[in-house]
Image (cartoon, grey):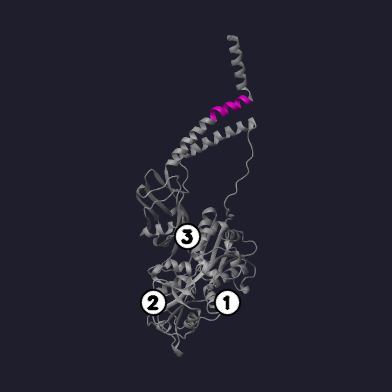
Amino acid sequence: MAAALGDLFSELGQSLLSSAGLVFLVLGVVVPAAVNVYIRRREKRRVRKKLLYNVLLNSRLGLDPPDAGDVVRLNDRNDDPIEQPSLAVVRITNDSESDIAEDDYRADTRVQFDDGAVRTVDVTDAHPSELSELISEGIKIEDNAVILPRKHLNAGERFKLLILLSGGGGRPDDVKVTGLIRGGDVVDARRPRSPAARRWRVATVVIASLSLGALLAAGLLYYAGPRPGQFPPHCSKGSLVVGGSSAFATATAQVAGSYSSYCTRAAVQVMPSNSQQGMDDLQASIAGNHKQQRVAMSDGRADPSVTAGTAEHAVAIVPYAIVLNPKVFAGATGPVNLSTAQVREIFGGTQKTWRDIDPRFAPLPVKIVARGQSGSRIAFERYVLGNGVQQSSQGQRTSTNCVDQDYVGNNQTFLCEESSTGAVIDRVRQLDGAVGYADAPDVTAAGASLLTVALDGHGDGLPDIVGGYPFWTVEHAYFRANGDELAANFVDYLTSPAQESALQTGGYPPCSANRKLCATR
């Protein structure tokens, strides 16, 4: 019996010392230990809560000085000018597997800037979308900080903050988010791993390598192909200026922030002016063979005279709205209905006071606040005042400062021109009896300080556009046709399915989901 047992243990020892035996020794000892450690760490991570923040953009907007001509001039919602404007985009995510309840916040969550004063904050690209309004209601601004409300966040819920500042615009590292979470942390998505986490990562790699070697030796490894993921932005290094339309500037800045967060060697600067100026700048760059890469955003297709040597992509539908100063109809509880014929009479100068148009309106003189040379103006003159093909002029300017009427001959109507979407909205808000037009998402962001017009009973939403609302266009992106790799990659990302949700949430139905409708303009 003793001899038999000795032979058995001898054979077992030789088996373990063989290559196959070593394989199963590794599998039987190392792998279970690794799995046990992994499960324990995974369980600990699962229980701990994590409020993740990612600074996608912190950059000067690069606007020209006010005396440089027909350029964007930014004012805040109190109509105060914003000096040296900059934009930050910060994404906040509950990145844990547990909900973060209202009583989990032990201190306020603050978005803090090293430099610059916060002027406005917008919540966008929320998942679910209802989260935007919930967060917006409780946000507070305190000098160089944004204080977030203590709201319940389910696991995986997220939103973006678009923060407009005066000054600032340094590096993403100049933005910090602080707070205290019960049983968790506020974590920078770009923060390097702790030494302990790095050691665990190294150990995991070593164990995985041993296990992989064992599996290879035992012939147990099989091939599993790659899983399809989300649309990856094609990254290129270099500098890119995105100019043109001011109506689409907020959406452009959002996408630029998202692209920059993926492609860290790409510097994307958003410099909105107007569609015509953007195309002129692009053509000058092409003609001069400049190294600076450019993308020009145009409200509607650009005139063929300025598209030589460019590539073009349809991006999104841009709905516009006609807006009124609230004193025009003090009793209004919703959109004010006007017919296309009435709007043409107003801009044609045949209606001098609002009471002439509707007895419910105030006896205020009509004051028109229009755009200068811009894609918004072309869309208004073509699709509202014109017949959809030919443009009909909005009239001659009679005021140079949008306050006093300089030309009163022939009983002319007050008409002034502003250089940007934001300037039109602000002017209509403060000028009694004013009427103007601007892109609908920016009008919506202005809130109850303006009255909107239902044109022939139609609103400006996508179903109304499909049903016949005429005042809309398609945003197009133009760039040098050959050689500008960063510009081409940025436009590919802008028009990709990955941006559908962001554009839709921002109020711009993407052409990638509405190809037939976009093809009509």
Query: From the viewer's perspective, is residue 41 above or below residue 467?
Result: above
Q: Is residue 85 left or right of residue 492?
A: left
Q: Is residue 342 left or right of residue 520?
A: left
For label 3, the residue is: 59
For label 1, the residue is: 388
Mark 3 residue type: Ser
Q: Cα distance, mark 1 to mark 2?
A: 29 Å
Residues packed near mark 1 inside 10 Å, few (<14), some (14 to 19) or many (20 plus): some
User: Picture coordinates of residue 56 (x, y %)?
Assistant: 48, 55
Front of the two marks 3 and 1? 1
Front of the two marks 2 and 3? 2
Disc 3 is placed on an element classified as: strand
User: Picture coordinates of residue 166 (x, y %)?
Assistant: 41, 63
Along the polypeptide, which appears first: circle 1 or circle 2?
Answer: 2
User: Picture coordinates of residue 206 (x, y %)?
Assistant: 55, 34
Mark 1 residue type: Gly
Query: From the viewer's perspective, is residue 343 above or below residue 188?
Result: below
Can residue 351 be seen? Answer: yes
Along the polypeptide, which appears first: circle 3 or circle 1?
Answer: 3
Is 23 colored magenta in this rendering?
A: yes
Checking the image for residue 487, the label placed there is none
Residues packed near mark 2 inside 10 Å, few (<14), some (14 to 19) or many (20 plus): many
- What span is in magenta? 20-30
For label 2, the residue is: 329
